Image (tube, rainbow, N blue to C red):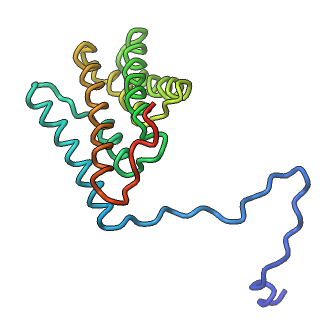
Amino acid sequence: MSTDSLLRPQPQPAPAPDSPRLPRRVGRAPARPTAAAAFHSISAVTAVLLGLVAIGAMIHEPVLIPPLAASAALVHSAPTLPLAQPRSIVIGHLLGAGSGYAVLALTHSSPWTAALAGGVTLAATMLARTPHSAACATAVIVVLQTPAPGRFVPLLFGSTVLLALTGFAASRVRRGAPKYPAYWW
């Protein structure tokens, strides 16, 4: 076999009639955002997260939790995704909290049960048609930190509504930005 035959593409046999066809081209990463779009998203996310910290400081209760930062990033960097819609954010996080408290009621706080709560949350959000990956982390936090539900759930609800409203407002500030939300409910 010569080196020429190694460099030339060899004909491929036709796939069997019942075999799945492989895609001819693999997808590409999204285009890099413009400087204005990146600045807008970064500014909006930072502002809403600082707002949550300020609210928490005023009421002497932590309001900013890591899953809300992930939700804010989704809303401001991928506003058209189903994961970023208000329905998914609000209901998803509430289902995550509910799943976490349900798992805690049946078991005890441990990393094992936190993992279980994350899985239960994913199932619940899929069944409710409210996919939101950050909600799984809310369930984990509930199991590992066991916050009092009477304080945690209302703060979580208010925070998720605030995230959706800031996404709505921010999408109207910059000309050419995708309008958020794609759907409310």
Q: Nearer the viewer, residue 26 or 94?
A: 94
Q: Is residue 79 above or below residue 30?
A: above
Nearest the eye: 175 or 157: 175
* Residue that protrudes farthest toward the right in the picture: 17
Examine the image and state in which quarter residue 157 appears: top left
Residue drawn 27% across and 55% down?
A: 42
User: Is residue 123 shown left or right of residue 184?
Assistant: right
Number of marks present in the image shown: 0
Q: Residue 184's spot in the image, x, y percent?
A: 42, 34
Position in image of residue 143 (x %, y %) = 35, 21
Quarter-of-image position of residue 26: bottom right
82 on left or right of 40 = right
Q: How far from the left and from the top, in percent, is residue 130?
A: 49, 30
Position of 7 compared to 128: left or right? right
- Residue at the far top in the pictured view: 106
Q: Nearer the viewer, residue 63 or 159?
A: 159
Quarter of the image where the C terminus is located: top left
Residue 83 placement (x, y as % from top left): 46, 39
- The residue located at (85%, 70%) in the rendering is 12
- Placement of the N terminus among the 4 image quadrants: bottom right
Which residue is pictured at 87% across the width and 60% down the height? Answer: 15
